[in-house]
Amino acid sequence: MRYSELFGKTLREAPRDEESKNAQLLARGGYVNKLMSGVYTFLPLGTRVLTKIENIVREEMAAIGGQEILMPTMQPKENWVATGRWDDFDVLYKVKSPDGREVALGPTHEEVVAPLAKQYVQSYKDLPLYLYQIQTKFRDELRAKNGLLRGREFRMKDLYSFHSSVEDLEAYYEKAKQAYAKIFDRVGLKALLTEASGGTFSKYSHEFQVQVESGEDVLYHCSKCSFCQNKEIVSADLDKLKVGEAGVCPKCGENLEVVSATEVGNIFQLKNKYSDPFKLTFLDSDGQTQTVMMGCYGIGTSRLMGTIAEVLSDEKGLRWPEEVAPYKVHLVSLGKSMPFANEVYHKLVSAGVEVLYDERDCSAGVKLGDADLVGLPLRVVVSDKTAAENKVELKARNSEEVRVISIDETLEILVK
């Protein structure tokens, strides 16, 4: 992609109405554009990042047996009334048509997937079953102020599992934990497995939390035994602590740290909570009717993108991990080096390397500053001096080391 043709350019200053670090950097870098509070357009760079994150999620869901579906955003009121959440789910968007019918804009899909499974699950031979989707969700958040970390319209992967027993549910629940750990590792984040309350979904759950200075959650974490609890469910003694204070881990007795974090994923053992309202049952091997046990497993993929921007950045800009970066290489032409830079560009693209090529007619300072802000993993600079020697400057975004090497050496490094 030639930078001059790219839709969505960098901004010198962050939008005045953006307070969070991720929103400021993503807007300045040309990744997103804010339409209104909690609602963003993903520009070409942002769409590429989001797609790569979601493809990683797809790969790991497939690895634990997940089959991808796509459920409707519009959901009938009667399904939500059946589960008791029409009036109890406080961030539910409710829409009334001109003829008086009411529907919900899906913030989650238990009310859709349980009656869906009922149409296909009759026998124990139909279980277990694992269905997931990546869908746009809607939640009427009162405080949509943290960029992609808390939106009113956002992208989410939700997986639903269906089991013939609690034991089978618990075994799959552990597989889901491992799959989530792989996802967060692949996108460059260290996520803490955190005990939490289940809200309207279940009594207890597990969250995956990433330590962020501006995070809305407070965690009590032990680095030795990995004990971690959300402040919402901790004991009275722990609840007296504040962020930064030390306490004693209730599991191993070591020092406990209190940290701010943001949630990037959660998993719940729903059991029969949504099976019962829709009479989701099956016939066991003895021909007896049994209730299907359910689990659900969510990852906010757009929220994950915002968390990466929040955590993996510096004073110069974004720093994308290679697996989710929109392009691998930021190629920059300086001075009168464009003929050789064009040659480098075509060789990189022909070798299958994803390249963002800045061939604009502007100063070196602007181009190099934009390269740091956009935050691609590698920067290749062609200047008058390097072009005269048929060489380029190669620099990683996370390093200060600059190597002057030939294009063939560059290709050997980039094409693996």
Image (tube, rainbow, N blue to C red):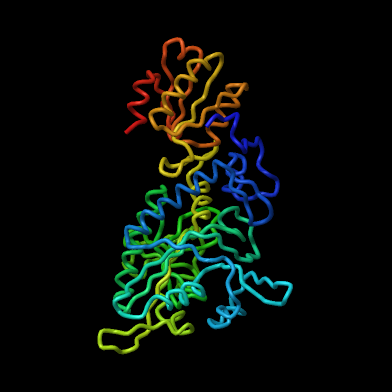
Query: Which residue is rendered at x = 57% and y = 31% of the image?
Result: 370
Q: Position of residue 82 (x, y in %)?
A: 54, 83
Residue placed farthest to the right in the image? Answer: 98
**Of residues 389 and 82, the one drawn nearer to the viewer in this rendering:** 82
**Of residues 229 and 9, the one drawn nearer to the viewer in this rendering:** 9
Vertical relation: 130 (above or below) 191: below
Would residue 300 be seen by someone viewing this image from the given angle? yes
Q: Position of residue 21 (x, y in %)?
A: 58, 47
Which quarter of the image is occupied by the C terminus?
Answer: top left
**Of residues 414 and 69, the one drawn nearer to the viewer in this rendering:** 69
Query: Which residue is rendered at x = 67% and y = 71% of the image?
Result: 95
**Image check: 169 left or right of 145?**
left
Quarter assignment of residue 81: bottom right
Would residue 220 be seen by someone viewing this image from the given angle? no
Q: Position of residue 213 (x, y in %)?
A: 53, 53
How many numbered discs, if any?
Answer: 0
Query: Which residue is rendered at x = 61% and y = 37% of the image?
Result: 7
**Image check: 157 left or right of 28?**
left
**Of residues 207 and 49, the one drawn nearer to the viewer in this rendering:** 49
